[in-house]
Each structure stands twice: as structure tokens, then as C-alpha cells.
Amino acid sequence: MQPKEQGGFRVRFQTVKIENPSGSNIIIGEVHNLKTVQEIHQQLLQVRPGIQFGLTYIEAARPNVVKYSGTDEALVHLARINACKIGASSVFILFLDNDFPIHAMEAIKGVPNVSEIYCATPNPVEVIVNQSEKGRSLMGLVDDYSSVGEKTAAVEKIY
């Protein structure tokens, strides 16, 4: 996509495909400080004994280091790779195996300073990143695939 001028700044949107070869559950969100991510780690350990996860956080302060933790080295590695690709500060990425994301979501929502949760899914995910002169920010994401349209046989009334 071509960069656009917005109030004197050049803005460029980019799509970053999240690598997830084993189809692990992914939770991507935004927090305000490293301490919050440490709290997320502790909360996840309370979800279920033996929970397997990899967690990363991209610091907002220079030099924007990727911090990581977790209980499964492969998931930590996957979270680190994807965090480096996204490169937007204050973003956390959680890869989760052997549990449903809904359980982790409840734990994460209970942590103060979690400002946004963008997704909790095993689906293919693409993150939309803004690159400006100041840095990178996460703007949103694409979760799974586009609808192919309404098909009468597949539409069900819920209420």
C-alpha cells in the first residue's frame, strides 16, 4: 500500500502474517507495562496445572526490547518470532496449547492495565501494522477468512 500524508506524517499500513504452524491458540492484545505482562504470566499459571504457553511483550521504551516468558519453549519461540515481525510497542502475544483460549481470556481480563484484546483464536491471523516516522503501532487484525456470502442452508436463526 502506498504511504499517505496524514497531518504532516507519512503513514504506511502493512499486513503481518502470524506464523502458527501447529494451529495453537493465539491471543494478541495491548498492555501498558512489563509488570502487567508478568501478572498475565502468573495468572495463566493459575488457569490449569501444566498449562503450556509462550508469552511475549514488546516494550514501548527504547530500545523496544521483546521480553518473553512461558512454560513451553516451542511456544515461547513462536511468540518471539511473531513479536519481532510485528514490532509494535506495548503489544503482547500469547500462544497457548492444551487449553481453550476462553479460560486464558478470563485470567487476562482480570489483570489491571490490559487495555485491549484483539483476538483469541486458533484461526489464521494477519495483523495490520501502521508504520509512521515515530514508530509502529498495531491497528487491527484479520482473523480467519472472509465470508463467502449468505447461503440459505447455512443460515440459522438463533432467537
Image (cartoon, helix red, strand yellow):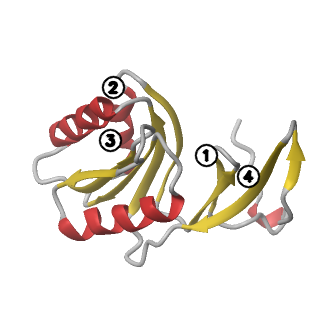
**3D distance between C-alphas at marks 1 and 2:** 22 Å
Q: Quadrant of the N terminus?
A: bottom right
SS state under label 2: loop
* For the residues bearing labels 1 and 3, Cβ distance under 8 angstroms: no
Q: Quadrant of the C terminus?
A: top right
Mark 1 and mark 4 lie on one chain; the one further toward the N terminus is 1
Q: How many marks?
A: 4
Give the residue displayed 60% in from the left and 66% down from the top.
16
> Residue 149 appears at what percent x and percent y?
85, 64
> Residue 68 appears at what percent x and percent y?
27, 52
Mark 1 and mark 2 lie on one chain; the one further toward the N terminus is 2
Quick one: 110 or 61, which is closer to the camera? 61
Give the residue displayed 50% in from the left and 65% down from the top.
85
> Residue 77 appears at what percent x and percent y?
29, 68
- Looking at the picture, which amino acid does disc 1 mark? Ser
Which quadrant would residue 114 be assigned to in this image?
Answer: top left
Q: Is residue 87 left or right of residue 155?
A: left
Q: Residues within 10 Å of mark 2 (few under 14, many from 20)?
A: some
Q: Is residue 13 above or below residue 30?
A: below
> Which residue carries the number 3 mark?
103
Mark 4 and mark 2 lie on one chain; the one further toward the N terminus is 2
SS state under label 4: loop
- Looking at the picture, which amino acid does disc 3 mark? His
**3D distance between C-alphas at marks 3 and 2:** 14 Å
**3D distance between C-alphas at marks 1 and 3:** 27 Å
Q: Is residue 66 left or right of residue 39?
A: right
> Which residue carries the number 1 mark?
137
Furthest residue in direction top, as rendered: 112
Between circles 1 and 4, the one closer to the viewer is: 1
Q: Residues within 10 Å of mark 3 (few under 14, many from 20)?
A: few
> Which residue carries the number 2 mark?
111
